[in-house]
Amino acid sequence: MYSPEDDKKIQEKIKNMLEGLPMHTPSEEADRKFISRLYKLSEEKRPVFELVRPVYRRTAVVASLLVLLVVAFNYLLAPQYAFVMNVKGTVKMCRAGTNEWFFVEKDKTAIRKNDILKTFSNGKADIVLPKRYELRLASDSEIKLARSAPKISGQGARYDLAKGKVYAYYDKLRNSKREFNIQTEEADISVLGTDFMVTSMPAINKTWVGVLDGIVNVTALRLNNLAAPIGQSVQVAPGEKTSVKLGNAPARPQRLMEEELLDMEELYRIGTKPQVALLISTGTGRTRELLSTAHLYISADRRGALSDQIRKINEQFGKAVKEGSKAAYLNNIRQFEEIVDKHPDPKYDVQFLLFVGAYYKHLEEYDKAIEILQRVVDNYRRSSLASIAQCAIGIIYEEKLQDTKKAEAAFRKVISDYPNSPEVDEAVSGLHRLSSENITK
Amino acid sequence: MAGTALPDKGWDGFSDEELIEKAKQKDKNAFTTLYKRHKGRIFSYLFRYIGDYQKAEDLMIETFLNAYTNLDKYAERGLFLSWLYRIATNCAKKELRKNWNVIEIPIDKTSERDGEQSLSEKIGDERSRPDYNARQSELKEFLEKILSRLKSKYKDVLLLCDVEGLSYEEAAKALNVTIKVVSMRLMRGRRMLFGLLRKHGYVV
């Protein structure tokens, strides 16, 4: 470090040294270069855009933006194409506006508006719009894409089934606000996401609809009876069916029969999640149906993990039935319970648990049955099937455990908590029985 | 070529600001006069900054062309030279960044050993030495060389203030720093330069 005095001298010395440095001059060549470039700079053409008057520039920008908007809008509203996949046997397509049929042999053949797809006696094909819907066309069937679905909002797709069978899986979650329609000569079937089958029998002018999941609206298209409301519809719930004959209103929905389920099974294995349907009716007697060991229909999960587990349980179930072994049944039922614990899904849990509860009751494990049914009441209050669980608890207490006090409490809870449910009638009957028993005692 | 000769009369009577106003109207002659007026200083500055004659010429041309193109951004009256130096400094720094193998000499913390003769005593009167002129010439050459190798922030202020004669305020505008920063860097820069000169025997 320098002393202040020395530092001052250093500062002065260096300053003087530097001040004494001579100025340098550029060459004349540099002058010439500069002038040349300066004049070139002045003569360079300005970009065309800058030559245009500002008002015209603004107009050009606005016009470009409008064009872009129109293009984007058209793109978003343009239809999404579905594709024909998994073609087996003889399948043909006729493009809209032509009368020429061609063989569909390759996967990912697009199907556009008004195209017709036809399967022959040995043919089958899927129509897939990824993440939206999947249709499986059975043999000897013919279907036309009557309306495509745009990429964003707006109506969903509509297919006209001229003849044969189609099984439809429509992703509810992705299409919650868009309808999907299948139309036949007799009926219009519309859904907001579900899993169902439609059969068109033009020979007898009849359309049949079976539902495994979700709610389907079936509307008669032509009604002969002038007194009947035009476009009369029925709602078909899971495990139900209806049919529409030409000129008539749709039949009252009824429970699907075993053979009808088997018929659907062949077309059933599409969609990506297990489809579960508790096959009970929608009427006041459904609790009793449940407790008489109703059928639980489960599809295979395409992804496999859960599917393997369910398949195993089904096999063991069959075995238990053959053996007539309670232990085997119990073991089987516990595995069903595990599915709810390990693979929870609010869509299916209630149906699984109701089935399990009913089976415990069938195996005379009444406390266990009530425990399972109570889980439904406690954890799935908003489910439309919770009232069944509550009513079933009352029936088990009344008829199996002879606990009239708890039975009465359970029936009263049905009336107070689920006043609009079909179980109210059953609960009222139960209370009558209990009170008349008291009288006779 | 038309317009290649420099105008040597007529425009010289105008001040920088008047010429700038005319140049803003795309008057090439006015701007050429500005070039002529300030090219020496800008070139000297750049030559010492870069240490290469040819490159310094190219950077000088680039500096003036940038100034011409951006004349509408010049708004500070009376500080045209500072503005030019700022453009020149930016051009020079950009050029130096390309030559990444140029080693900048860092600050050298010079210190006196105890017991040594004081600098005042050592400096003495150099003019009495017989080889003074030759030494001076050598010294200037060395200074030019060493200046270009200094770290940017000290080189800037030394060149602008001590060599080019800009005031602290003008240098601060050129470098976009405060006057205090200029003053501080100048002092440290001078000390550093002194240390280097002493190390190489140009001062005692």
Image (cartoon, rainbow, N blue to C red):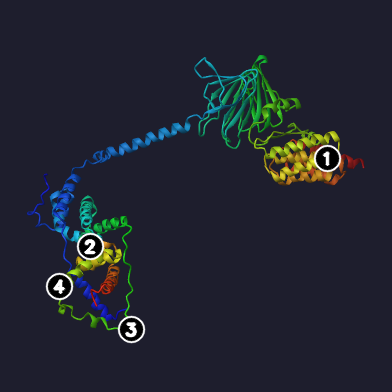
Q: Which residue is mark 4?
A: B133
Q: Residue at x 30, y 83 (%)?
A: B116
Mark closest to the chain's N terminus, 2 or 3: 2
**Comparing marks 1 and 2, which lies closer to the viewer?**
2
Closest to the observer, A254 or A326: A326
Where disc 4 sits, the SS reads helix
Where disc 2 sits, the SS reads helix
Closest to the observer, A249 or A225: A249
- Whether labels 1 and 2 share one chain: no
**Comparing marks 4 and 3, which lies closer to the viewer?**
4
Mark closest to the chain's N terminus, 4 or 3: 3
Visible in this render: residue A292?
A: no
Q: Which residue is mark 3?
A: B114
Image quadrant holding the N terminus of chain B, namely top left
Q: Distance between the Cα atoms at labels 1 and 4? A: 116 Å
Visible in this render: residue B188?
A: yes
Q: Distance between the Cα atoms at labels 3 and 1? A: 101 Å
Q: Distance between the Cα atoms at labels 1 and 2? A: 98 Å
Q: Is residue A431 above or below residue A262?
A: below
Left or right, B28 with respect to A210, comes to: left
**Comparing marks 2 and 3, which lies closer to the viewer?**
3
Left or right, A175 with respect to B32, comes to: right
Q: Position of residue A46 (x, y in %)?
A: 23, 41
Q: Residue at x 82, y 44 (%)?
A: A408
Q: Which residue is mark 1?
A: A328
Q: Which residue is mark 2?
A: B48
Q: Distance between the Cα atoms at labels 4 and 2? A: 22 Å
How many dots with numbers? 4
Q: What amino acid is found at the position of numbered circle 3 in the picture?
A: Asp
Q: Distance between the Cα atoms at labels 4 and 3? A: 33 Å
Image quadrant holding the C terminus of chain B, namely bottom left
Q: What amino acid is found at the position of numbered circle 4 in the picture?
A: Asn
